[in-house]
Image (cartoon, rainbow, N blue to C red):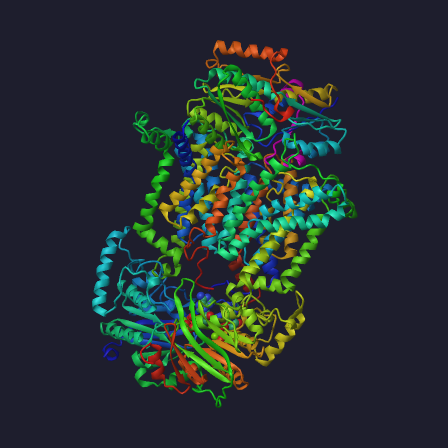
């Protein structure tokens, strides 16, 4: 109904352009969103979706371009102006003060006077009303850091509604949600839409787009490449628009020939710095010549599991065996010498030192290796030669080992990490999010390398929040939920089954 | 558009920008001189003549430079590992005790060149010992090293006070200081160095420790950019998370770095204690540890930069002393003001001019 | 003199010695709660001591002196803000720089203006905050226990002392009961949340620094024209750092800040008292041990042996939106 | 002979109302009498003395006078480098043929003011606050105690030192706190021998309506009615004599010890404290003065054996 009921535009973006230093994040973007509709924006990591929405919300300033709300051009100098114009945004990374209560977070910036007392009472009332209207239930006196992410997101939505948002932007809201929580969110969004609010939903999950949006726009590499009515398009078309060419949905790979157990984990428990149990009594095995994938919604303990196996985090209890040797509590340096390689989830913070030159990063973690120097000294010539060889083999561009790593694009940065870890010829390879923020060409390349490792008889443990990636690479799939392994399926398992398991519903 | 990530060539990053920051620091310092009713240009002239005009002046300048190289290196080594060591002052002070104990026990028996290596070790050990506790607190307990090193400056000051006032003082003497070392506990003056350039060292205390300082610069350069340890330090300094991924042990590197940093600071004591006054005096460091912060920031934490900026501060210190003599209204504390301005403009405000320079540069090269 | 009199005497001294710490630590509370580390408290204290002494000396008016002390302290705060907020410089480096500027400038100007080795002239009695005898202090004196406590500890301080202790509940109220306080605490934890709520992070932090400068101005003024009658070289003598330590010890909360400052003040007073006296069994304790005690204690506190303190999360990190 | 006199102060600053100001007064008097200009230098920290002394010597100044024991080692070095220049140092001994070392018998002056303190005290408790804890200051304290006891044998004397570094000369806040401490313990006359720190002592005594005793210069005028007297140490004489003797070719090296007899130390009596010193006190102190000169009273010199008999 919404689609036909109003063709009047709520938002028009005209010629928006934005650079971050060398990165051209938004290139001359035009976008129109109809009032009372749910508009989806999809695009790969780094396509510029968040940037565009942050400009609309006054968080960033466009270098060029115009914004019109309900047909009227306005200048959005800061978020205050955006809020005044009826725009609310739920950010990809929550903007909550963690040691504040829900109430304080909702009030912040809309306190209703110099003193808090009056505002507190009226906010409490208003929260109650919003809860009744939309079923957005949270305890106003709960402290944010003690709430589950789902509830935290609800607080973000409440914040926007409390400020009277008519236009609501949600930036990848489901990344941290289980399918059930996502369903609940979508229900709320539909209610909002039916009350005449306009919603922009950013995601790169095509399924969600098909399920809830009225119209959808696709971004690629900073450009707005297409806008479609959701009813009139298909998943295949959107995928192709998104990456700019036909997408291979499955990776070619042969039968696995599992050999002996190279990595095994028994009853592993890991706690975070606050003492919260993140990995709860997990046991698993990875054999030579197989890829074991770990599926799960982000934040269910996969990262901590990987870090514990890689020796970065000390487990609270349990044992880890590398080729039969107990290694729990052993540091990363020794693990590497025992034949474990680790491609970390976050290349910017872990895998690379962005300020280093490329060749310096090509030895990160292996800098104590005999090949790279004698005694206490490093042999820079040897290191650079080695780096050049990897650059050639992995087609890293530009092929310059003296270039600062920050100046490589995301895909090439990931290749630097992959080359470093795979070229060491490890027995066990553990990988987190191998293709996050990487373009499709590099994805295929990296996937091929991973399969080659398996075929060469290595044990591979893979963590990814992209279910498609897990399904196309893994020989076996373990599903993690709330720190526990809740089930195991073969690589052929259906999306439906896995999704339910990820929500902790079925096993 | 943000300009922070636009790359600039090295000669701008390491040449033009520090120079402009320095000019700003001097401009504001000049304002102060002007405000108290003196001519800043005349003051600058007096300062330069005082520092570089005669062989003796140069000798004093290089004497101060020597101290600042040590403390500058000390601060720089720590910064490379991401640690801000404000404790060089106290480390140098305690280092003096190490050097003095060696000199006092050996000067009767052996010539200076036998004493020297032991004194270097003694000074470094004591300096390192002073850095060890803050380092341990940072490494194991996460206590902020900036605060703990400041605290240790005070603690060391009390300790040295006790040692000098109650233990090492020469009975019957007023001043809390040790006896004068015999020649076996003194470092020789570098007359030959100045006379090579046709000057006369005179009474200037430029001494052998200047050469030790230069050697240390080279060793620090090797350490930071040519050794595995240096690689680990730099990794930790830029990205602690990458360091933990790479298996670089945080606590160990923090400890080692701070011990090296403290050791370098401690060696600074050789210069005044064994090179100049031939005795351990109360408060002999006289702020050189703090100057090290400015020297390191100004010199972009690189040994070559540190030599240059230590020379700059050497000129300031010597020239400042002469200046305060000829222009009594400009006391030597003016140097502290300049030092503060340099830290402010070269350190805290280092990015202030960058956007303008980026724009200027892009126009100049006809960039986008 | 019996033990009770000694205690009264030491307590009185502790109050006097903790006042500058209290003002400074509360100043630090505001800036650090807003996410700006302020190692420059020491310098601010020194600069304001100098300014207040100069103005009080010239005008013979203590309140004008206070105004000048506050003014200069705010100027220093603004420079700190310009470096660390506007230009996103390193907050610690900026603070260290300002400490040097203050240390040097006060002596250079003092020497140029007064020729007394960096000291200012002796401020006349009208230019000082003298002690106030509270009503009934003399009458109360004879009452056991409470009498001397009231007459010698509570009464007989100067107005700034009472203001200092009044500032504790006021700070608490501002932080926890006003909009400004809510926003200030938020910006120290997550500036992004404040920014997206449509509040300017920079202006909020600047205001926090101005409040810090305001409070710190009192501490310098207290040193120069309440506790003594002139500015003296380096008169802050590390009190800014001790205040910082008290702030950490107090886990960035107003009332504990007061208690921590009183503790450090007490240590100092106790050290003064113990000087030259011998302790049974030990003999005369070297005064240096007492001098070092606050610093040693600070290290012990920082080591977390008395509970780990969680600093404001965004503290020390300049807020950057665009990399 | 031709003189080009120079003067290096201690770190308290030229107008410290005390020690340095006295030195300055001596130089001024020389200038007034002879019309000869002098140069002076105010080091603001301990490291500057040596360079200042050397600078003067190397620029042909003669004589060079440095007041303060802090310049002892500096003088030892520089005087050896410039054997033809005449030097004088106050409060310390430098054993070189071209250096005159001027010492004062502070114990004698302190004895006199101690006597007055003892007589003026109503509580029978008096205080002493020293600057840096060095033998020189103990010497003040020792003579003072002896004087107090001469007036009231059962009097109690509280003694405190401000600190153990040069900063102790410049810490009126601590000086004030220590004074308050002593007042709380019952002291009603407090003698400050602590340079600029003493300003805090005198201030606090005045604030609390107690008596104080100044040092070095005549400080009676600082808080009229509150400063009982001052132990005047005639540093001006040392400076004046060094300048004058050089001019008259009468400069002699070696140690000069100035006591009550030489008028090197004295108690101060002027309009500001006239009302505080009763005729009785005046008689007693003048008598003591005569006895010291005659040798009938011996005041113990702490530095002779590094100990104090009482
Ligand atoms: N604050 C910033 N400073 C500098 N560069 C930025 C900033 N924010 C984003 N970028 C860059 O701009 C480009 C677009 O980023 P943006 O966050 O808009 O992508 P996105 O489409 O939201 O990706 P994702 O799906 O990963 O959230 C990327 O190359 C990114 O690195
Ligand atoms: N932080 C940075 N600092 C400097 N230059 C950068 C930075 N990030 C990216 N660049 C430059 O901007 C260009 C675009 O970067 P971006 O990460 O958006 O690439 P991309 O188009 O996503 O490529 P890929 O598909 O390989 O990830 C890169 O080629 C790189 O040179
Ligand atoms: Mg995004
Ligand atoms: Mg990319």
Position of the N terminus of chain A by quadrant: bottom left
- Whether residue B201 sits left or right of residue A108 in the image: it is right
Among the 4 quarters of the image, the one containing residue A56: bottom left
Q: Please tell me whether residue C76 is drawn above or below residue C57 in the rendered image.
A: below
Give the camera-side residue of B228 and C206: B228
Image mark count = 0
Q: Position of residue D10 (x, y in %)?
A: 61, 30
At 43% from the left and 55% from the top, the residue drawn is C315
Give the camera-side residue of A18 and C80: C80
Among the 4 quarters of the image, the one containing residue D187: top left
- Whether residue B352 sits left or right of residue A67 in the image: it is right
Residue farthest along the front direction in this orientation: C281
Among the 4 quarters of the image, the one containing residue A500: bottom left
Range shown magenta: D29-52
- Whether residue B274 sits left or right of residue C51 in the image: it is right
Residue B161 visible somewhere in the drawing: yes
Give the camera-side residue of B13 and C318: C318
Residue D46 visible somewhere in the drawing: no
Q: Please tell me whether residue B168 is drawn above or below residue A8 in the rendered image.
A: above
Q: Is A70 inside the magenta-drawn segment?
A: no
Position of the C terminus of chain A by quadrant: bottom left
Q: Position of residue A316 (x, y in %)?
A: 44, 67
- Ligand 3, seen in the image, is in the quarter at bottom left
Q: Please tell me whether residue A314 is drawn above or below residue C136 in the rendered image.
A: below
Q: Position of residue A322 (x, y in %)?
A: 52, 76
Residue farthest along the bottom direction in this orientation: A254
Q: Please tell me whether residue D291 is drawn above or below residue C111 in the rendered image.
A: above
Give the camera-side residue of A187 and B123: B123
Q: Position of residue D123 (x, y in %)?
A: 43, 19
């Amino acid at each position: 109904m919404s689609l036909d009921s109003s063709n009047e535009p709520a938002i028009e973006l005209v010629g928006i352009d934005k650079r971050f230093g060398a990165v051209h994040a938004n290139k001359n973007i035009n976008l129109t969103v109809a009032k009372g509709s749910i508009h989806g924006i999809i695009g790969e990591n780094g396509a510029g979706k968040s940037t565009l929405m942050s400009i609309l919300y006054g968080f960033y300033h466009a270098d060029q371009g115009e914004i019109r709300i309900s047909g009227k051009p306005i200048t959005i100098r800061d978020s205050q102006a955006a809020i005044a114009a009826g725009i609310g945004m739920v950010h990809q990374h929550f903007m909550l003060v963690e040691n504040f209560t829900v109430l304080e977070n909702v009030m912040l910036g809309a306190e209703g006077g110099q003193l808090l007392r009056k505002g507190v009472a009226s906010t409490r009332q208003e929260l109650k009303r919003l809860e009744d209207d939309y079923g957005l239930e949270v305890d106003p006196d709960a402290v944010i850091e003690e709430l589950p992410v789902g509830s935290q997101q609800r607080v973000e939505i409440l914040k926007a509604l409390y400020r009277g948002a008519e236009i609501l932007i949600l930036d990848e809201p489901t990344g941290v949600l289980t399918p059930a929580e996502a369903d609940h969110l979508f229900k709320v969004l539909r209610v909002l839409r039916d009350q005449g609010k306009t919603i922009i939903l950013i995601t790169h999950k095509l399924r969600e787009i098909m399920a809830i949006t009225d119209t959808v726009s696709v971004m690629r590499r900073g450009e707005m490449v297409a806008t479609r009515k959701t009813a009139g398009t298909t998943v295949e078309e959107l995928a192709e628009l998104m990456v700019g060419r036909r997408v291979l949905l499955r990776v070619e790979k042969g039968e696995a020939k599992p050999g002996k157990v190279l990595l095994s984990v028994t009853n592993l428990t890991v706690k975070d710095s606050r003492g919260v149990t993140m990995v709860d009594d997990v046991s698993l095995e990875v054999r030579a010549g197989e890829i074991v994938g770990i599926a799960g919604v982000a934040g269910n303990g996969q990262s901590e599991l990987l870090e514990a196996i890689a020796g970065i985090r000390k487990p609270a209890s349990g044992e880890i065996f590398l080729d039969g040797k107990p290694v729990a509590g052993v540091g990363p340096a020794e693990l590497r010498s025992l034949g474990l390689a680790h491609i970390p989830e976050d290349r910017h913070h872990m895998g690379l030192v962005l300020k280093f030159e490329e060749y310096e990063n090509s030895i990160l973690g292996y800098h104590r290796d005999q090949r790279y120097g004698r005694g206490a000294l490093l042999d820079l010539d040897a290191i650079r030669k080695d780096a050049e060889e990897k650059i050639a083999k992995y087609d890293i561009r530009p092929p310059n080992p003296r270039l600062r790593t920050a100046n490589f694009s995301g895909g090439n940065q990931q290749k630097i990490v992959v080359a470093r870890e795979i070229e060491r010829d490890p027995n066990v390879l553990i990988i987190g999010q191998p293709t996050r923020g990487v373009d499709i060409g590099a994805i295929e390349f990296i996937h091929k390398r991973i399969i080659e490792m398996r075929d060469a008889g290595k044990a591979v443990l893979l963590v990814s929040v992209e279910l498609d990636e897990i399904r196309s690479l893994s020989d076996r799939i373990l599903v993690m939920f709330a720190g526990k392994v809740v089930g195991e399926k073969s690589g052929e398992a259906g999306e439906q089954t896995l999704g339910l398991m990820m929500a902790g519903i079925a096993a | 558009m943000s300009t922070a990530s636009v790359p600039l060539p090295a000669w701008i990053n390491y040449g033009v920008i520090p120079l402009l920051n320095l000019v700003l620091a001097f401009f504001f310092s000049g304002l102060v001189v002007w405000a108290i009713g003196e001519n800043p240009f005349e003051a600058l002239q007096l300062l330069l003549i005082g520092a570089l005009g005669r062989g003796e002046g140069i000798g004093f300048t290089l004497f101060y430079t020597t101290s600042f190289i040590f403390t500058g290196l000390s601060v720089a080594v720590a910064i490379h590992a991401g640690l801000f060591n404000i404790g060089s002052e106290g480390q140098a002070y305690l280092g003096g005790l190490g050097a003095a104990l060696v000199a006092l026990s050996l000067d009767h028996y052996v010539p200076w060149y036998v004493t020297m290596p032991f004194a270097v070790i003694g000074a470094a050990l004591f300096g390192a010992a002073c850095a060890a506790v803050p380092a341990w607190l940072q490494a194991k307990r996460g206590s902020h090293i900036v605060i703990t090193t400041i605290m240790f400056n005070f603690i060391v000051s009390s300790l040295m006070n006790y040692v000098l006032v109650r233990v090492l003082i020469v009975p019957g003497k007023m001043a809390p200081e040790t006896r004068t070392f015999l020649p076996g506990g003194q470092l020789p003056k570098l007359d030959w160095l100045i006379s090579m350039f046709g000057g006369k060292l005179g009474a200037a205390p430029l001494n052998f420790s200047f050469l030790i300082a230069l050697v240390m610069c080279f060793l620090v350069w090797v350490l930071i950019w040519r050794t595995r340890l240096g690689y680990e330090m730099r990794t930790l300094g830029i990205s602690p998370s990458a360091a933990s991924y790479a298996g670089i042990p945080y606590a160990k590197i923090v400890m080692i770095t701070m011990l090296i940093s403290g050791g370098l600071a401690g060696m600074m004591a050789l210069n005044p204690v064994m090179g100049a006054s031939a005795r351990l005096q109360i408060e002999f460091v006289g702020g050189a540890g703090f100057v090290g912060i400015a020297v390191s920031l100004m010199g972009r934490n690189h040994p070559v930069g540190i030599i240059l900026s230590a020379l700059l501060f050497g000129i300031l210190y010597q020239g400042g002393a002469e200046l305060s003599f000829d222009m009594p209204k400009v006391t030597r504390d003016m140097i502290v003001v300049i030092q503060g301005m340099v830290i402010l403009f070269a350190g805290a405000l280092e990015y202030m001019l960058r956007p303008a320079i980026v724009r200027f540069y892009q126009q100049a090269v006809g960039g986008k | 003199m019996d033990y009770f009199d000694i205690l009264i005497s030491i307590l009185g001294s502790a109050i006097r010695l903790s006042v500058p710490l209290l003002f400074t630590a509360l100043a630090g509370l505001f800036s650090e709660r807003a996410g700006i580390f302020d190692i420059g408290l020491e310098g601010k204290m020194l600069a304001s001591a100098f300014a207040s002494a100069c103005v009080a000396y010239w005008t013979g008016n203590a309140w004008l002196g206070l105004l000048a002390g506050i003014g200069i302290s705010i100027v220093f705060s603004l420079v700190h803000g310009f470096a660390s907020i506007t230009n996103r410089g390193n907050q610690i480096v900026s603070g260290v720089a300002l400490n040097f500027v203050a240390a040097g400038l006060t002596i250079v100007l003092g020497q140029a203006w007064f020729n007394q080795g960096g000291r200012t002239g002796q401020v006349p009695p009208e230019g000082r905050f003298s002690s106030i005898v509270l009503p009934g202090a003399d009458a109360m004196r004879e009452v056991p226990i409470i009498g001397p406590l009231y007459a010698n500890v509570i009464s007989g301080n100067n107005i700034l002392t009472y203001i200092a202790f009044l500032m504790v509940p006021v700070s608490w109220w501002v932080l926890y009961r006003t909009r400004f306080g809510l926003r200030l605490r938020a910006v120290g934890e997550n500036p992004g949340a404040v920014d997206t709520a449509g509040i300017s992070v920079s202006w909020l932090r600047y205001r926090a620094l101005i409040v810090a400068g305001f409070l710190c101005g009192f501490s310098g003024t207290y040193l120069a024209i309440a506790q003594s009658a002139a500015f003296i070289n380096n008169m802050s003598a590390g009190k800014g750092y001790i205040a910082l330590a008290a702030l950490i010890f107090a886990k960035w909360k107003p009332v504990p800040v007061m208690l921590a400052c009183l503790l450090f003040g007490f240590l100092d007073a106790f050290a003064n008292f113990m000087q030259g006296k011998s302790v049974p069994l030990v003999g005369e304790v070297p005064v240096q041990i007492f001098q070092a005690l606050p610093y040693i204690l600070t290290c012990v506190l920082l080591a977390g042996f008395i509970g780990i303190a969680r600093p404001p999360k965004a503290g020390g990190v300049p807020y950057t939106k665009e990399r | 002979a031709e003189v080009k006199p120079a003067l290096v102060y201690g770190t308290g600053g030229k107008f410290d109302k005390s020690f340095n100001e006295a030195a300055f007064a001596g130089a001024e008097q020389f200038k007034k009498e002879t019309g000869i200009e002098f140069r002076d230098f105010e080091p603001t920290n301990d490291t500057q003395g040596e360079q200042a002394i050397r600078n003067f010597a190397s620029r042909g100044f003669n004589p060079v006078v440095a007041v303060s024991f802090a310049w002892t080692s500096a003088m030892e070095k520089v005087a050896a480098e410039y054997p033809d220049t005449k030097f004088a140092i106050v409060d310390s001994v430098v054993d070189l043929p071209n250096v005159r070392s001027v010492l004062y018998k502070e114990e004698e002056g302190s004895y006199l003011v101690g006597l007055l303190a003892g007589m003026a005290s109503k509580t029978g408790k008096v205080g002493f606050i020293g600057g840096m804890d060095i033998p020189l200051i103990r010497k003040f304290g020792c003579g003072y105690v002896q004087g107090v006891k001469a007036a009231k044998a059962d009097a109690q004397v509280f003694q405190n030192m401000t600190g153990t570094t040069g900063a102790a000369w410049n810490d009126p806040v601590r000086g004030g706190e220590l004074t308050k401490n002593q007042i709380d313990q019952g002291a009603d006359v407090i003698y400050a021998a602590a340079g600029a720190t003493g300003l805090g002592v005198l201030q606090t005594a005045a604030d609390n309506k107690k008596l104080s005793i100044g040092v070095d210069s005549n400080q009676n005028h600082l808080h009229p009615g509150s400063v009982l007297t001052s132990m005047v140490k005639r540093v001006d004489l040392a400076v004046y004599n060094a300048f004058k003797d050089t001019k008259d070719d009468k400069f002699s090296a070696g140690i000069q010890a100035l006591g009550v007899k030489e008028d090197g130390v004295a108690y101060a009596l002027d309009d500001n404290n006239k009302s505080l010193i009763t005729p009785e006190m005046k008689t007693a102190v003048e008598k003591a003065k005569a006895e010291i000169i005659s040798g009938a009273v011996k005041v113990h010199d702490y530095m002779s054996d590094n100990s104090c008999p009482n």
